[in-house]
Amino acid sequence: MAPPTGKRVKGVQIFRPFVYGTTARPFDEKTNPKPPGIPDDHTHSWTVFIKGIDDVDITYWLRRVQFKLHESIPNHVRMVEGIKGQPFQIHETGWGEFEITMKLYYVPESSEKPQTLYHHLRLHPFGRTEEEKEAMRLNGGEVISWVYEEQIFNEPYEPFYDILISGALPPSASTLKDGGGSGGGGGGSGAATPTSANTPGASSNKGGNKKGHERSHSRASVSTNKDGKNNEPKEEPFVIQRSEGGVLERSAMIPLVNRPGQPFSRETEQLEIQKLKEAKLKVDEMRKQMMDELEKKQKRLEALKAESAKAA
Ligand code: SLL
């Protein structure tokens, strides 16, 4: 961790969405043959990863990730350095499930301490219900356990703040052109509400006040300075727009709709909200029924008491 440079930007929280998790497949002669040299007792190939939502680059805030695997795996502590536009990931094979520890090391400009995330490697179909497990079995045996998360930078140091809001770019632009500072456009800033989609059990490894999700995501052509003044971008080689509901690099957007391999979107969020609303209605209904029954019982008790008082 580098010594802090500059001052913290007070009263500001910047968040960046990301996705982490595991994908596993059983070995199968046709669809997933076991490579030579893999021990007989290994039943699955699997991958653990941390990446940007919609596969956008996150190396401008995340520098390296230390993955700690099960001790039975050779060389079980692995450091993965960020490569621009690529996920932080490890491919492995094995026979058992276990908890993976991921230590996130941020870019030096952030002066942030590393943070740890935990994720359970899933090799076998899982879910809250048999239906959910069956849906996984139908998925060609691929077991996906992914979590949507938001990294909050609370009152970031000025140099890091400048990097974070250095300008939203079209997807993959970061692989074409280096570095921050050019282009216009602020990424969204705001507070986090960790959610999970399609995966039971979202994690949340940090605090932060919840302000909901309707935040400034798409100020893509005008940047806002710390002093609150709007600046026209100095150099703007292209008109920056979301394409196909995808997200801009270096923004806090999430996709508008689901696409193959991208299960986290506004659409998913709406479905989750709908599920919560339905669950609340059900709980309200159950509560009302119980209250009605309680009232009936209380009346009956009163009646019995009155009867016994008369008899005495
Ligand atoms: C279990 N508690 O009993 C867990 C342990 C260990 C998994 C799982 C070894 C791979 C290798 C491997 O898959 N270990 O030998 O490279 O399920």
Image: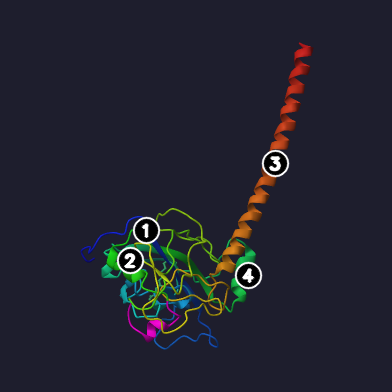
Q: Which mark is residue 12?
A: 1
| Alpha carbons under labels 4 and 3: distance apart | 34 Å
Picture coordinates of residue 68 (x, y %)?
Answer: 34, 69
Q: Nearer the viewer, residue 217 or 81?
A: 217
Q: Which residue is mark 3?
A: 288
Which span is picked out in magenta?
169-180
User: Quarter holding the C terminus?
Assistant: top right
**What secondary structure is found at the residue carrying circle 3?**
helix
Main secondary structure found in the magenta portion: loop
Q: Which residue is mark 4?
A: 134
**What secondary structure is found at the residue carrying circle 1?**
loop
Q: Is residue 177 magenta?
A: yes
Counting residues from the start of the chain, the first of labels 1 and 4 encountered is 1
| Alpha carbons under labels 1 and 4: distance apart | 44 Å
Foreground: disc 1 or disc 3: 1
| Alpha carbons under labels 1 and 3: distance apart | 43 Å
Say whether marks 2 and 1 touch (CB < 8 Å): yes
Counting residues from the start of the chain, the first of labels 3 and 2 encountered is 2
Q: Residues within 10 Å of mark 3 (few under 14, many from 20)?
A: few
User: At 59% from the left edge and 61% from the top edge, which residue is drawn?
Assistant: 272
| Alpha carbons under labels 2 and 1: distance apart | 9 Å
Which image quarter: residue 138? bottom right
| Residue at mark 2: C-beta within 8 A of ligand 1 | no
Q: Amino acid at mark 1?
A: Val
Q: Is residue 247 magenta?
A: no
Q: Which residue is mark 2?
A: 161
State which image quarter holds ligand 1.
bottom left
Q: Quick check: can you spot residue 66?
A: no
User: At 40% from the left edge and 81% from the top edge, which residue is drawn?
Assistant: 236
